[in-house]
Amino acid sequence: MFGSLSSFKSLIENSFKYLNPGSGFLECQEWLLDLYCDDNTLQNAKDYAFGEWVNYAHEASEQSLDPPRPLRIAHKIKGWMEEAGFVDVHEKIDMVPVNGWSKDPHLKNVGKWHMANWLNGLGGFSYGLFGPMGFGWSPTEIEVFLINVRKSLQNRKVHAYQNFYIVTGRKPGEDEGMDGEEEGEDDEKGKGKDEGEEEEEESEEESEEDEE
């Protein structure tokens, strides 16, 4: 759904409305477009064009598209699901390298596929944001800009990565509260406690009568 909705929050609220109580689940998988780096190779890089592309993408999606379709939403999904009424909400965040720079075999492989995805889809992503619907750039202006973006995506000296969010939640049953517990459960616990205290008091009174 990346960049296709004007309100991801509304999608979550509508999903909650139509799910079956107790057994209906919603799972959202979304990219957070922002770039991260743990060793300052990104911060120290000069003219890292992919970083510039990310900044332009955020600007275009939030200020130029009509209606706006914000891209920076992945980190908000958990809160939106909880606000909508979902319970058992879990958030998993996976680190995805921009290319194959990682020494970890698994992350290196994931990074290579991630780079391939970006290189193959970069034109399609860019024309919607920077073309007539967005910034109004011409096809030539877009393609010239993307030359350095593609080069930067393949630069393994910059150890950049993005985060991929997986968020799941369940619609509570009609007999459940917002915390996922059955309504009346706390009352039963309290009731049991009160009954136990009454029995203890009766026992103490009987003991005192016996002593007299």
Image (cartoon, rainbow, N blue to C red):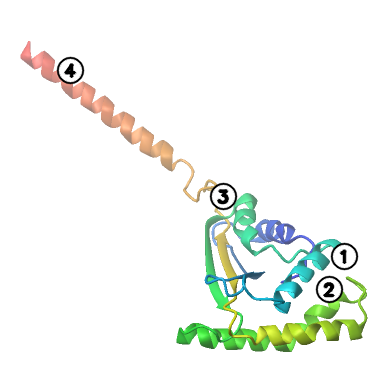
**Element type at marker 3?**
loop
Left or right: residue 59 versus residue 201 is: right
Residue 147 image point, x, y percent: 78, 87
Determine the CA span between mark 1 and mark 3. Answer: 43 Å
Determine the CA span between mark 4 and mark 2. Answer: 80 Å
201 is higher (above) or lower (below) than 100: above
Res. 174 mark: 3
Which quarter of the figure is the C terminus placed in?
Answer: top left
**Element type at marker 1?**
helix
90 is higher (above) or lower (below) than 179: below
Residue plotted at (56% across, 87% down): 100
Residue plotted at (55% across, 47% down): 178
Residue plotted at (58% across, 55% down): 86
At label 3, the amino acid type is Glu
Mark 4 and mark 3 in contact (Cβ < 8 Å)?
Answer: no
In primary-sequence order, the first of circles 1 and 2 is 1
* Residue that mark 1 sits on: 64
Determine the CA span between mark 1 and mark 2. Answer: 8 Å
* Foreground of the two, 150 or 87: 150
At label 4, the amino acid type is Glu
Determine the CA span between mark 3 and mark 4. Answer: 43 Å
* Residue that mark 2 sits on: 129
Mark 2 and mark 1 in contact (Cβ < 8 Å)?
Answer: yes
At label 2, the amino acid type is Leu
Q: Which of the two discs, 2 and 3, sits closer to the camera?
A: 2
167 is higher (above) or lower (below) than 53: above
Mark 3 and mark 2 in contact (Cβ < 8 Å)?
Answer: no
* Residue that mark 4 sits on: 205
Residue 181 in view: yes
